[in-house]
Amino acid sequence: MKPEERWDPMLFDTPSPERNGRALRIREESGYTETQLNQYFYEFDTMRDLLSRLGSGKSMDEVTRGMAMDRVEKLGEGRSRSARRRLDKNIRAPKKAEWLTM
């Protein structure tokens, strides 16, 4: 990565031809596959979202539950109602009282 890319990760934030060119260059120089690089970008975006939500004062339980629900909504787009319900049922965990875990 170039120094400007290390200092400004927002250069990779939005899909664009420039981002694709940067990603191709990084992939060729590092020897990683496209799948590995896309996984890295996904994990980076997830961590940035997680830390921003935690920084706003929410608890870890609220953040992880909210992120799971966001994922369900994203995965459920364009699917039938029964498929969305099955997906929601598989991802949503039963809520436990916080005082039980202390």
Image (cartoon, rainbow, N blue to C red):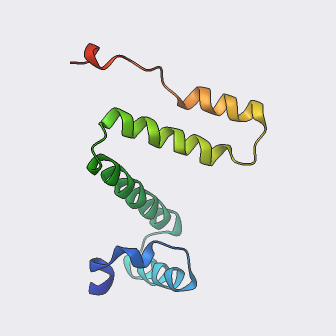
The answer to whether 11 appears left or right of 3 in the picture is: right
Residue 94 at x, y percent in the picture: 47, 20
- The answer to whether residue 2 shows anywhere in this view is no
In front: 12, or 24?
Answer: 12
- The image quadrant where one finds the C terminus is top left
In front: 101, or 36?
Answer: 101
Residue at the front extreme?
A: 56
- The image quadrant where one finds the N terminus is bottom left
- The answer to whether residue 80 shows anywhere in this view is yes
In front: 24, or 5?
Answer: 5
Residue at the top extreme?
A: 100
In the displayed structure, 101 sits above or below 73; it is above
Exactly how many numbered labels are in the figure?
A: 0
The answer to whether 80 appears left or right of 46 in the picture is: right
Residue at the left extreme?
A: 102
- Residue at 46 percent of width and 83 percent of height: 22
- Residue at 52 percent of width and 28 percent of height: 92
Residue 24 at x, y percent in the picture: 50, 81
- Residue at 58 percent of width and 40 percent of height: 72
The answer to whether 22 appears left or right of 52 in the picture is: right
In the displayed structure, 100 sits above or below 45; it is above
- Residue at 69 percent of width and 48 percent of height: 77
Snapshot quadrant of residue 9: bottom left
The answer to whether 1 appears left or right of 71 in the picture is: left
Residue 61 at x, y percent in the picture: 35, 32
Residue 63 at x, y percent in the picture: 38, 40
